[in-house]
Amino acid sequence: MSGSNDLYLRALRGEKVERTPIWVMRQAGRYLPEYRATRARAGDFLTLCKTPEMACEVTLQPIDRFGLDAAILFSDILTIPDAMGLGLVLEEGVGPVFERPLRSAADIAKLGRPDAEQDLGYVMDAVRVIRGELNGRVPLIGFTGSPWTLASYMVEGRGSKEFRLIKGLMFEDPKAMHQLLQIVTDSVIDYLTAQVLAGAQSLMVFDTWGGMLSTENYQRFSLAYMQQIVSALKNDQRTAATPIVLFTKGGGQWLELMAATGCDGLGLDWTVDLATAKDRVGEQVVLQGNLDPTVMNTGAAQVRDEADKVLQAYGQHKTGDKGHIFNLGHGIQPHAKPDNMQALVQQVQQHSAAFHGETSD
Amino acid sequence: MSGSNDLYLRALRGEKVERTPIWVMRQAGRYLPEYRATRARAGDFLTLCKTPEMACEVTLQPIDRFGLDAAILFSDILTIPDAMGLGLVLEEGVGPVFERPLRSAADIAKLGRPDAEQDLGYVMDAVRVIRGELNGRVPLIGFTGSPWTLASYMVEGRGSKEFRLIKGLMFEDPKAMHQLLQIVTDSVIDYLTAQVLAGAQSLMVFDTWGGMLSTENYQRFSLAYMQQIVSALKNDQRTAATPIVLFTKGGGQWLELMAATGCDGLGLDWTVDLATAKDRVGEQVVLQGNLDPTVMNTGAAQVRDEADKVLQAYGQHKTGDKGHIFNLGHGIQPHAKPDNMQALVQQVQQHSAAFHGETSD
């Protein structure tokens, strides 16, 4: 028992905290030898996701090793479409692929809304097991892909560069597009609610592909549905107190629009200047990010220098600021060095207190 | 002889024009059957680029077919590294690959600055042949990749998703990184100057990968070198009158920084809201863009609707505005339908006059 660390939750509620909390996107991942060992034992990635004890094991590995301030549920972002019957498989060298992608408005009309506890019970079981194993050490973050991001995978059938199929649907049959986004959104709301009921203490929405849209279409086809999610969770007494963070990769132009949803925090990718973001929306939302993940592939000296720059960019936490949570601007990469993660966590935990002193200006 | 159309150049100089000019990135490309026929005759892409008569042929194809308002030199963005001896080849399904990528500071130290007329004579010959064939019909745009974009390819050896090698160099050996960017920049200045002397009437810098950088590193490693290019060309009486447009894909957060270089225009990708961009920098620079290229893969009705939205987003051209040049927000894709290009050109040429009327407000 190393005591209870709720720094991340307090920061996410916009409270004054003694230092900047840190967690890292994909902190449980291939860069860690112990993760690779568990995955080898699981045989494949989806078995790892679908076996609560194994998902728990990899979720806790970076907490045990680095002393991060929050754990994030280990799972895949495509669990909902999988539960809808699209047949998720992982192809080596390609990534996630659906065996039965959506190819018509008729395919969309046939979709059903999964029962989160029944059809995605392995995720809720993982949340419960992890909460038990964490035993209060650090908070647990639940998550989902954004409706637009899930819909993109469901229509393209796999990752894409040009998003020709999903954008074709968007331009040529916006009614079917909205129908798809609505059933995915309803399912996401059920899914996040169930995660909270199972024990998730904060939530994150990963909008990996919203940044591929024009500003107008981002608002109509991605943000409007994230807005529904935020509103639904904030209006449900079971989830109203659970902070929620939105992250649109490539969304640096849209921070004001995102903050206006009423979410608690925004994830920022590394292209965003954190000082400018603070000026723009720092009194409305907590800002989470945003070190360039490729720094983690270099040397510890570079990691410390670049971490300091991020801390300095946010600068002093003053009254009225919602605050800063340290993270990378995107997931840590397989080539990252575990020693760099240690250097990063130490640097942030030791150097950030200076930015939380009481100042009157 | 169909007369001389200098609308594009007048618009790029910020003059009042009677309608919005249009050209399209990659307007000479795989979506056109006549392009595919010429390329088949050439045998491969690099032979097409390096044979001035063939480069001229494909450059003029979309002008002849659609009546666009500008032609752009058909060439590859990697001609300079190829002339530096890196050995450019095109691998089917992979794209451009260098046989001898840069793998050390020693590799960088050995690089020589190409003689634009001798080592890249085929490009200048193409410019001269095209100008002759165009015979004043529409202006000819010359171009280059940005130093950061060229350096990325030179170090990665090919296109990349994570830019691990180039960013490793940037973080771990910034001195060598700057040395590389400087010799590339000097070579780009020579190259663009030679294109102007050969007959290019405006210039475009494609910063395809600048959007992968943090704001700080964008300024240090991409924009600073584009600034050198703009300054050098503006300070040389041979090139001072030739308008230059900068395009950083994913650079929507940095329009003010880009406009401050003294360039004449900015290319905008489709994620940027054109009305907002006009408010931000529309009195400093001409704005070029920015229809989502995937629209061109759908139907003619969608193309016309979306083109109208772009025209409306820029809105009325008023005194003090530098103006708008219509384009896509990135290159037209191989799946685009030629009939959609016709619909787009007609829509812009017919509907844009309404935005150029004399108004007093």
Image (cartoon, coloured by chain):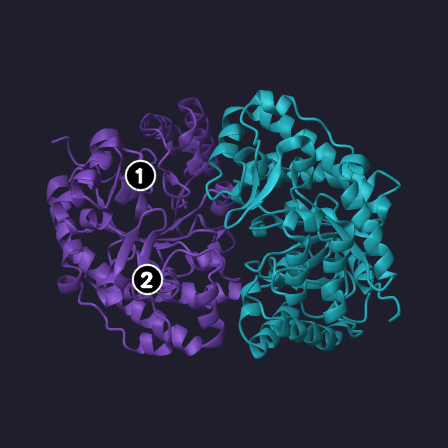
Chain colours: A cyan, B purple
**Camera sees residue B25:** yes
- The percent position of residue A94, horizontal first and vertical second, equals 51, 47
Instruction: Specify few, some or many for label 2: CA neighbours under 10 Å numbering under 14, 14-19, or 20 or more.
Output: many
Which quadrant holds residue B185?
Answer: bottom left
**Marks 2 and 1, Cα distance to the nearest angstrom?**
22 Å
Identify which residue, B210 or A203, lies in the foreground: A203
Find disc 1 in the rendering and name its residue.
Answer: B23
- The percent position of residue B150, horizontal first and vertical second, equals 34, 61
**Camera sees residue A279:** no
- The percent position of residue B115, horizontal first and vertical second, equals 17, 67
Chain ID, mark 2: B
Query: How many discs appear?
Result: 2
Q: Residue at x 48, y 42 (%)?
A: B274
- The percent position of residue B198, horizontal first and vertical second, equals 14, 55
Q: Would you say B187 lies left or right of B1 here?
A: right
The label shown at residue B230 is: 2
Circle 2 sits in a helix, a strand or a loop, which is it?
A: helix
Q: Which amino acid does label 2 sit on?
A: Val
Identify which residue, B244 or B27, lies in the foreground: B27
Identify which residue, B86 or A47, lies in the foreground: A47
Q: What residue type is labelled 1?
A: Trp
Q: Residue at x 16, y 63 (%)?
A: B119
Q: Residue at x 24, y 67 (%)?
A: B84
Q: Would you say B183 lies left or right of B317 here?
A: left
Q: Which of marks 2 and 1 is nearer the N terminus?
A: 1
Circle 1 sits in a helix, a strand or a loop, which is it?
A: loop
